[in-house]
Amino acid sequence: MAGNAEPLSPRAKLAVTAGKAAAAVSRAAGKGSGSVIGGRVALKLDPDLLARLAAHLDVVLVSATNGKTTTTRLIAEALRAAGPVVSNALGANMPAGITSALAGGSDARFGVIEVDEKYLAGVARDVDPKAIALLNLSRDQLDRAAETRMLAEKWREGLSGTKALVIANCDDPLIAWAASSVTNVVWVAAGQEWKDDAWSCPSCGGVLQRPGDDWGCGDCGFRRPMPQWALHGEHVLDPHGAAWPIKLQLPGRANKANATTSAAVAAAFGVPPQVALERMWQVTAVAGRYDVITFNDRELRLLLAKNPAGWLETFSLIDGPPTPVVLSVNARGADGTDTSWLWDVDYTRLTGHPLFVIGDRKLDLAVRLEVAGQHFRVCENLDEAVAAAPGGRIEVIANYTAFQDLRRRVGN
């Protein structure tokens, strides 16, 4: 059990103070929350600060291509049943942002930390986590992220020998391979809707057989582990076979899967599934995602989708036709500047919806929709799209920086 925070050294105190000051200046200048610049300044002054700030915490790390921000939020809410929590709730998930978040957690018992996939092994070495949740791996940010098989291998090597309890999605072969070097694993059957990055065996390169929800390699014998926890319809099945109802205000099957993993994590810290799942009901939105807002006298629901797997999940939860849909895509540094991933998204699922296209790369998206045989209108901005959309609630789907642009425009 983690104890109370030890007093920080003078150097660490100076680093924390300087980081908070830098963050305050950034906020005052309208440059965002300041968490990243604040963390960078603090780590420059004390490179070991992240480890010092985490020393008194029971830390949970959460990493994945999709769903890590929401799952981090659900785990944090569940663990508050057992004590105070510090978390990078706004999604600043690289070492600088994590350091800024933990700098405000001197009185916390738990640290629930979302980690960018590329930094997972390094952050795990720094903070000595008690648990690590691994959700999924799929193609994302093709110009900066490693190929998914390479990333799974890096996780496998980086987590080898960890003392942490790893809670891993056994339905994703890449996650199963990444966790295969770990001694203490709890397997969760959380599902895998997007399978296009997991048809070859990550162990030997052979072709995976995928009958139903099962999978296995006939060449080397690598196969789906037996789950202890599972998502079953509207319930979480625990290791004893008990079924616990999932009641979320967040929409979609993907969030039920996130809740299942979160319940497994919470149980590892002594929070019963019933208590954990009841607390998750309180989560209504995550950093603006799923928020329903009024803009120009219209009701809009804001949805984030950053890559093919994310778009697939999002299409499954929007209201059916003829609900209008606004699509916004940017290709800035935080998104990845390569938009070729648009061709991996099945936009025929939007047939029947009036579509309105905005964002920095609206013409890239327009070409993709044209090839998919969709009817759409290219608009200069959200105002024009909303004015042109027929009546009723509008679903607004955007990738990362486009989503932040939209939140600023609607005052969310």
Image: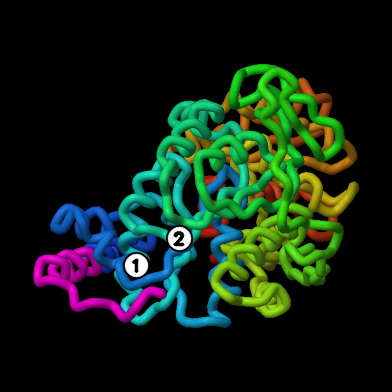
Q: Are marks 2 and 1 in contact (CB under 8 Å)?
A: yes
Q: Secondary structure at mark 1?
A: helix
- Using the rendered image of the protein, determine whether residue 303 is visible from the camera's viewpoint: yes
Disc 2 residue type (three-letter): Ile
Disc 1 target residue: 102
The magenta span reads 1-21
Question: What residue is shown at x 56% (from left), y 39% (from top)?
Answer: 180
Question: What residue is shown at x 31% (from left), y 81% (from top)?
Answer: 4
Q: Is residue 135 left or right of residue 312?
A: left
Furthest toward the left, the residue is 10
How many other residues sit within 10 Å of disc 1, few (<14), some (14-19) or many (≥20)?
many
**Front residue (pair 161, 13):** 161
Q: Is residue 18 magenta?
A: yes
Q: Is residue 239 above or below residue 56?
A: above
Which percent across, then down, holds residue 126?
A: 31, 54
Q: Which mark is residue 113?
A: 2
Q: Is residue 326 above or below residue 262?
A: above
Q: Is residue 134 magenta?
A: no
Q: Earlier in the sequence, mark 2 or mark 1?
A: 1
- Using the rendered image of the protein, determine whether residue 368 is visible from the camera's viewpoint: no
Q: Is residue 192 above or below residue 407?
A: above
Question: What residue is shown at x 55% (from left), y 30% (from top)?
Answer: 148
